[in-house]
Amino acid sequence: MYLGLSIENSVINAAILNDCGDFVWQDSHSLDHDKISNLLEICGALVANAAKAHPNLSQSIAVSAQGGFIGQPSPPDGLKCLAGTDLKANLQASLGRAVALASPGQALALYESRFGAAKDSAVACALYLDNHVFGGVTFGQKLWRGANRIVGAWGHTPLAWPVPHELDGRDCWCGRTGCLDCFLSLGGLETEYHNITQTRLDIKAIAAAADANDLVASSVLQVLDDRIGRTTAMIINMFDPDVIILGGRLAGLDRLYQNVPRKWPGYLLVERNETKLQKANQDVFTLAKGAACLAIDPAI
Ligand SMILES: [Zn+2]
């Protein structure tokens, strides 16, 4: 029995994967305060509930989080308590268990390669597009973690094949400029619309406006198609995966699955490509389930 947790802003989700490959338990709990003591308390309660429901729980657990990785900056609009925190050390001390940490992109890649759209794929890449941009790569249904545990950190690589105006004034929270996180995050999309209209709409409202023939909204989404097209083309040139999975709230835009692959011929070295673009499972427990898959791996 393997337990995974996902810390998703103020909610922590939990899922258990059994030895037969079935998810047999899930639970979630909201934080009361943005304090590390409260976060550890909630994680402890979820682990206790899991161990009560399934006493033969593995000693090691895994956690998906957007911040709290020692030596890495944390998103400023995420949990403040994760900034500058060694989340792994705190969890291990608090829970008395070995803990593996993964980014949402890594947890997503692992879930999809074991149970989702990439379960038959030798090489799969995941791109998690939500408040921030994360990625992950699996080879043979196994997460490639890397020497620094940052495989898939495309959110902080530059936008591929930029046009001149895309090189200006894109300050990223990581301290650099021009990162993908500035272009492909929810905030990046909303800023794009706001800069033209001085009106701030969320992604659902922008999509609805485009459907109602709002020319600015349509244009912003066409640019998004192209930017995700360039980003995924760069990933194909780098890893040549069988499938690229899009997750997070931006991945809910159905137009992407038709429009993005149409961009690829302009950027790939081959005229016909076999890589598929697929939408991730939209279940709210997907990242917790991906973390549970990581808990099986002894390479904590
Ligand atoms: Zn950055």
Image: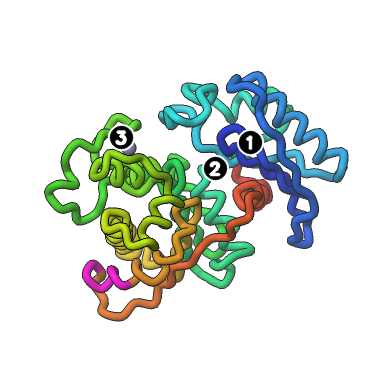
Q: Which residue is mark 3?
A: 172
For label 2, the SS is: strand
Q: In which quadrant will I find the C terminus? A: top right
Within-10-Å neighbours for mark 2: few <14, some 14–19, many 20+: many
Residue at the disc numbered 2: 102
Tag 3–tag 1 contact (CB < 8 Å)? no
Q: The magenta stretch spans which residues?
A: 262-267
Q: Is residue 12 left or right of residue 72?
A: right
Q: Main secondary structure of the magenta part?
A: helix
Cα separation between marks 3 and 2: 21 Å
Q: Earlier in the sequence, mark 3 or mark 1?
A: 1
For ligand 1, tell me if the residue under mark 2 lies within 8 Å.
Answer: no
Colour style of the rendered protein structure: rainbow
Q: How many marks?
A: 3
Q: Amino acid at mark 2?
A: Ala
- Percent coordinates x, y for residue 97 in the rendering: 72, 32
Mark 1: which amino acid? Val
